[in-house]
Image: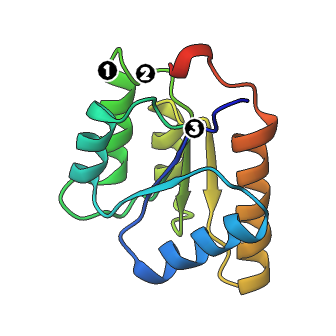
Amino acid sequence: MTYLRAILLVEDNPDDERLTIRALRRSNITNDIVVAHNGEEAIQLLATIEPLPCVVLLDLKLPKIDGLEVLRQIRGSDRTRLLAVVVLTSSSEDRDIVESYSLGANSYVRKPVEFDQFNEAIRQLGLYWALINEQLPGGL
């Protein structure tokens, strides 16, 4: 039996957190979902969680440490530098997109405002990153 690695959701908005988890569950994504509510909590989790998550869904506008700094620290650590990171944010600012990719984001997804579109975007993200994408062996 293959162990399903967790999905790390880094999200400070309780409504977006609930919607994201609900959309993943409705898509039959059965991976554990670990939630960090700010950047500092995300960095602490990534220092200790075993195995590493299959993907980090990372908001940019976070308290304590913003998402770009979280991404910078993920890529700067030997432990997490190869971890899949999807920026999942409401920002469509060019500078956020460019900076995210410059720091090594694997994908940048703007959260759709419309409920059905939001659910579909999360469904596709979950299916791709948790089931279709070939993960690094050994929880790297």
Quadrant location of residue 13? bottom left
Q: Is residue 43 above or below residue 20?
A: above
Report the Cα–Cα distance between label 3 and label 1. Answer: 20 Å
| Label 3 vs 2, first from the N-terminus | 3
- Left or right: 76 in relation to 11: left
Which x, y percent locates residue 84?
56, 33
Q: Secondary structure at mark 1?
A: loop
Is residue 49 left or right of 19 when viewed as pictured? Answer: left
Q: Nearer the viewer, mark 3 or mark 1?
A: 3
CA distance separating discs 3 and 2: 17 Å
Image mark for residue 77:
1
Residue occupying the point 36% across, 31% down: 74
Circle 3 packing at 10 Å, graded few (<14), some (14-19), many (20+), is: some
Q: Is residue 88 left or right of residue 59?
A: right
Quickly name the residue at label 3.
5
Considering every residue shown, the one lying at the far front of the view is 1
Looking at the rendered structure, the kind of residue marked 1 is Ser
Residue at point 72% right, 85% down? 114
- On residue 81, the disc is 2
- The type of residue carrying mark 2 is Arg
Q: Is residue 14 left or right of residue 129?
A: left
Q: CA distance from mark 2 to mark 1?
A: 5 Å
Look at label 3 and name its amino acid: Arg
Task: For marks 3 and 2, give the one nearer the viewer.
Answer: 3
Circle 3 — which element? Answer: loop
Q: Position of residue 136 (x, y in %)?
A: 62, 18
The quarter of the image holding the N terminus is: top right
Q: Locate residue 90, reporting x and y percent.
A: 53, 69
Helix, strand or loop at label 2? It is loop
Residue lying at 57% horizontally and 38% vertically, measured from the top left: 5
